[in-house]
Image (cartoon, helix red, strand yellow):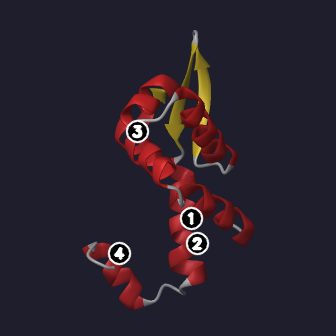
Amino acid sequence: MVETQAIDVLHALSQETRLRIVRYLVDRGDDGASAGEIGKVVDATSSRASFHLSALENAGVITSKRQSRSIIYRVSFECLGHVISFLLNDCCGAHPDIRACCLRGDCC
């Protein structure tokens, strides 16, 4: 992942509703979810959910695929993995203190 891509992904994730959407879609795995279902879970109107889904898709964090009359959204595990790897390895030089913090999950 190049720096500009990482910035786009981090920007997309730096909003509360979008982060909730990603968390939900991670839990849904390969099944994904429709925009309506996502909107209900994150308590967003359909237009607001659509706006956030579009931002996440443009950054590559999620993908969409038409299924019959619905559009199903799925998280891109590959994209999330790349941005985490970029932060840990490229940005932070795989610093051992940062690695240890990631494994414990108790930082900040």
**What residue do we see at 57% from left, 54% from top?**
79
Dot 1 amino acid type: Val
Does residue 63 appear anywhere in the picture? yes
Q: Position of residue 74 (x, y in %)?
A: 51, 36
**What residue do we see at 58% from left, 42% from top?**
52
Q: Secondary structure at mark 3?
A: loop
Q: Secondary structure at mark 1?
A: helix
Dot 3 amino acid type: Val
Does residue 32 appear anywhere in the picture? no
* Closest to the observer, 48 or 4: 48
Q: Earlier in the sequence, mark 1 or mark 3?
A: 3
46 relative to 91, above or below: above
Residue count near mark 1 (Cα–Cα under 10 Å), binned few <14, some 14–19, many ≥20: many
Dot 2 amino acid type: Phe
Q: Secondary structure at mark 4?
A: helix
What is the number of the mark on residue 102?
Answer: 4
Q: Quadrant of the N terminus?
A: bottom right
Q: Position of residue 38 (x, y in %)?
A: 44, 32
**What residue do we see at 65% from left, 46% from top?**
55
Q: Position of residue 32 (x, y in %)?
A: 45, 31
87 relative to 71, above or below: below
Residue under circle 2? 86
Residue under circle 1? 83
